[in-house]
Image: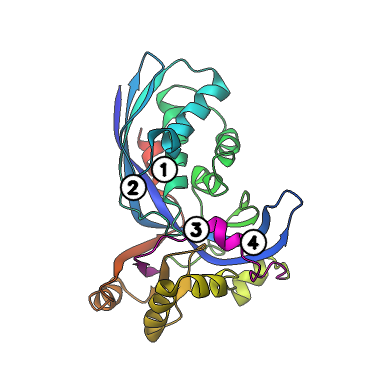
Amino acid sequence: MSAADWPAPAKLNLFLHIVGRRADGYHELQTCFQFVDLCDEIRFDVRRDGVVRRLAGAAGVAEEADLCVRAARALQAATGCTLGVDIAVVKRIPMGAGLGGGSSDAATCLVALDRLWGLNLPRQRLADIGLKLGADVPVFVHGHAAFAEGVGERLVPLYPPEAPVEANYLILKPNVFVSTADVFRDPELTRDTPTITLHGFLKHGGHNDCLGVVRHRYPEVARALDWLNQFGQARLTGTGACVFLACESAERAQAIARDAPPECEAYVARGMNESPLLARLAAE
C-alpha cells in the first residue's frame, strides 16, 4: 500500500513568552502557533515485515536520529503494530530555522501511519506519543492554530473570530543554524515574563523573549531583522533563525523578497489556521 504527498506544514510563533522555569530544567512558555503553506511532503509505503526504513530525508541527519523514523517506531512501540513502512521526505522547510519542520514531519508520520496501519487512535493519544519526540509535535498533530502553554503542549485551538489573521508572510532564513538548547541555556534569557490570557494576547499582542539573546549570539539574524524592519514590524519565530513580516498581499511580500540580502533565503507563504494535513487526512 502506498500513499503519496502527505503535507507537513511549517509554523510561525506569533509571539513567545517565557514565564518560568521548571524543576526539570524545561521552560514554561506561552505562544501562539499558526501554520503556513510552506510544506515538506512525505510518501509512505507500508511494509508487512515490520521494518521502518527511510528512503529520503533531511540532509546530514542520520536515519536513527530522523524524527520521522523515530515517530514511526514510537507508534509501533505504543500499539504493538507489526506493520512497517518506507518513508521518503521531500524537504522544503529549512532546518534550524524556528519553523518546526522536524516536528511537523513527525506529526505527519503519526497521523498518516495511524490511518495507513489501521490503528485509529484518538488524536490526543497521537499527540501524547508525539510530545515525547518534541514539544511542538502536538500542535501539528491536532492541526489547528492554537494558543499554547506549558512547554507548548497545552493547546487552546483558535477558531474565528479569535483565530489569527491568515496574512501573507515574507520569511527570511539567514545562513546560520540556531541552537535552541544554547538559547534556552543563555543566562541573559528573560524567564519571568508575566503570564497573559488568550484575550490579552488577542487585544495587545506579545513579543518574543528569545529575541535579545538571539540577536546577540547570532549577528546574521540581527542583520536580517534590521533589514526586514525597514518594511514593517519584523518578528522572530521560535528561537530562529527565521524572521518574518506580515504583508498586505502576496505581491508585496514577493516584491520585498526580490531585494532580500543575498545571504538570506526568502520564502513567501500564506498563513493557515487549519493544517493542510487535516484536508489530506479527510481525503484519504
Q: Are marks 1 and 2 in contact (CB under 8 Å)?
A: yes
- Crowdedness of circle 1 by 10 Å Cα count: few (<14), some, many (20+)? many
Element type where label 2 sits in the image = strand
Q: Position of residue 251 (x, y in %)?
A: 26, 74
Whether 155 is drawn above or below 121: the answer is below
**Which quadrant holds residue 260?**
bottom left
Q: CA distance from mark 1 to mark 2?
A: 7 Å
x and y, in percent, of residue 246 in the image: 41, 73
Q: Is residue 71 magenta?
A: no
- Contact (CB < 8 A) between labels 2 and 4? no
Q: Which residue is mark 1?
A: 105
Q: Which residue is mark 4?
A: 30
Question: SS at mark 1?
Answer: helix
For disc 4, the neighbor class at 10 Å (few under 14, some 14 to 19, many from 20) is many
Q: At 56% from the left edge and 75% from the top edge, which residue is drawn?
A: 212
Q: Secondary structure at mark 4?
A: strand
Res. 179 mark = 3
Residues in magenta, as a range: 167-193
Q: Secondary structure at mark 3?
A: loop
Image point (55%, 45%), residue name: 134
**Residue holding disc 2:** 40
User: How much space separates mark 1 and mark 4, taking CA atoms?
Assistant: 23 Å
Closer to the camera, 255 or 198? 255
The residue sitting at the bottom extreme is 230
Of discs 2 and 3, which sits in the foreground? 3
Q: Amino acid at mark 3?
A: Ser
Q: Residues within 10 Å of mark 3 (few under 14, many from 20)?
A: some
The residues bearing labels 3 and 4 have C-alpha atoms spaced at a distance of 20 Å
- Looking at the picture, does residue 24 appear above or below residue 35? above
Q: Nearer the viewer, residue 123 or 94?
A: 94
